[in-house]
Amino acid sequence: MQSNKNIGLSFKAILSLLCFLVVIFPSISHVKNTFAVENQNSSEEELLQKLKEIQEQIKQSNYDLKNTKKEVGTLSSQIKLYDAQISKKSLEIKETDLLIAESELALNHINSELSIIDDEIEKENNFMETAIRALNEYDSDIIKVLLRSGKFSDFFDELNSIQQINVKISDVLKRIKLSKTEYSKIKIILEQEQDEQLLLKSSQEYQKISINQKRGEKNDLLKVTQGKEGLYQKIIKDSEKTVAEIRNQLFVLQNSGGSLRFGDAVKLANFAATLTGISPSFLLAILSYESNIGKNIGTGNWKKDMYDCYVRLGKSAFANTQKAAFLKITSSLNLDPDKMKVSREPAYGCGGAMGAAQFLPSTWLLYEDQISAITGHKPPNPWDMNDAFVASALYLKDLGAGGQTDATEWKAAMRYFAGNNWDKPSLRFYGDDVLELAEKIHKDILAIEK
């Protein structure tokens, strides 16, 4: 057994050590709001300056494009329009590149803060173990302490040391609890930043495909006209489609693995749109835009591209929710889940969206009763065109498309694409593109309905 003197010293040493812990490890509560404050390092300052410059150029590009659209009817004006559209999309891609770089800096900063808190918690736990081990080894029976001490003053010194150690242990426990609470809050911030970065990478894919389409249209026009105005006017006149040609052109839906005649697609859209109060041309624009952009759609497997993907991203609860919903849907339809195609896992995020509507399984279940009430299919089938069109129309209505104005439809398209991030300026290209496509589709619909 240790001597009284050694025991007393060990307690005093532990007490001093715990006091030192309280001093050298500052409160980490300041971390809570650090991510709302601009990082002052030179890399972020440079990024912010570049972003500001690009955003000013985009404003000017929007103004130029608006004026260019007024100049129509000639080959030179059409080429000028293409150039303006390509220039705007190019600037938007540069903006997205900068926003992704900014997001990387933010993620690095957040991960660094989490690492610091991890280290603090580990050190505090180590000190706790040392103090508790010493208390457990010490015989705290008051009578034995008194007999060992010899002097009342030594006895009370030892009791006081024990009491102070217990107080410090309690303080450190509170600090550890606070650290873990702050860690959890910062973890949520990390997940939100990661989700925003996935959205940026998703939008970048849309932007790159969209700009390539515009470049292709411009090059095709220059090729067939050979840069001659007379030939352009002749082609415009000769290319006016008849009603039959419009009706029979293909309305491709890659996400469903097939296509419809445009006239048939219009019938489905009219049926769904009339009963939900949205514009059929807007509904077709959303479905068409998503299909033309999403080349990876309809080629995936629920387990590999949805369930396993979300598990890898650390979203096991979400993965299990989607798995249960998908198996419930396929079981109710007597379908083999392993044979039903869903969207493939892209370079960003996960797949798992079903059919032409591209609903995730859990979202589909939310709309099942409403779909059935309109189509009469019980249960409705995400891979059935009629059910899918109605599902999309119901969802767009809930997003505000029932107003059938440019403003309400633009906002609905943005909410469809970006959710709560719908009003971010860097993502507005999506709503702009969808409304442009809806206008073209509307003209074709008017032609076949005359």
Image (cartoon, rainbow, N blue to C red):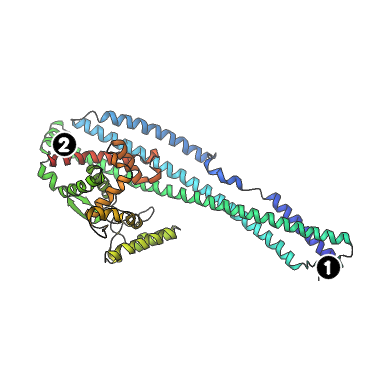
Give the amino acid at mark 1: Ile
In which quadrant of the rendered image does the N terminus lie? Answer: bottom right
Instruction: Name which residue lies at 29% across and 64% down.
Output: 332
Q: Is residue 60 left or right of residue 288?
A: right
Q: Is residue 230 left or right of residue 367?
A: left
Instruction: Name which residue lies at 59% across and 52% down.
Output: 116
The answer, for residue 389, to whether it is visible in the render is: yes
Spot the residue most to the front. Answer: 373
Residue nearer the viewer, 446 or 311: 446
Compared with residue 70, is residue 370 higher up or lower down, i.e. above or below? below
The location of residue 169, given as percent across then percent down, is 70, 57
Q: Circle 2: is it few (<14), some (14-19), or many (20+) Cα within 10 Å?
A: some
Q: Element at badge 2? A: helix
Q: Element at badge 1? A: helix
Label 2 or label 1, whichever lies nearer to me, is 1
* Residue 225 - label: 2
Residue nearer the viewer, 232 or 265: 265
Instruction: Name which residue lies at 19% across and 53% down.
Output: 259
Give the amino acid at mark 2: Thr
The location of residue 357, given as percent across then percent down, is 28, 52
Q: Is residue 110 left or right of residue 438?
A: right
Residue nearer the viewer, 7 or 362: 362
Q: Circle 1: is it few (<14), some (14-19), or many (20+) Cα within 10 Å?
A: few
Q: Which residue is mark 1?
A: 143
Q: Quadrant of residue 445?
A: top left
Callout 2–callout 1 Cβ contact below 8 Å? no
Compared with residue 168, is residue 408 higher up or lower down, i.e. above or below? above
Question: Separation of disc 2 and disc 1 at Cα?
Answer: 107 Å
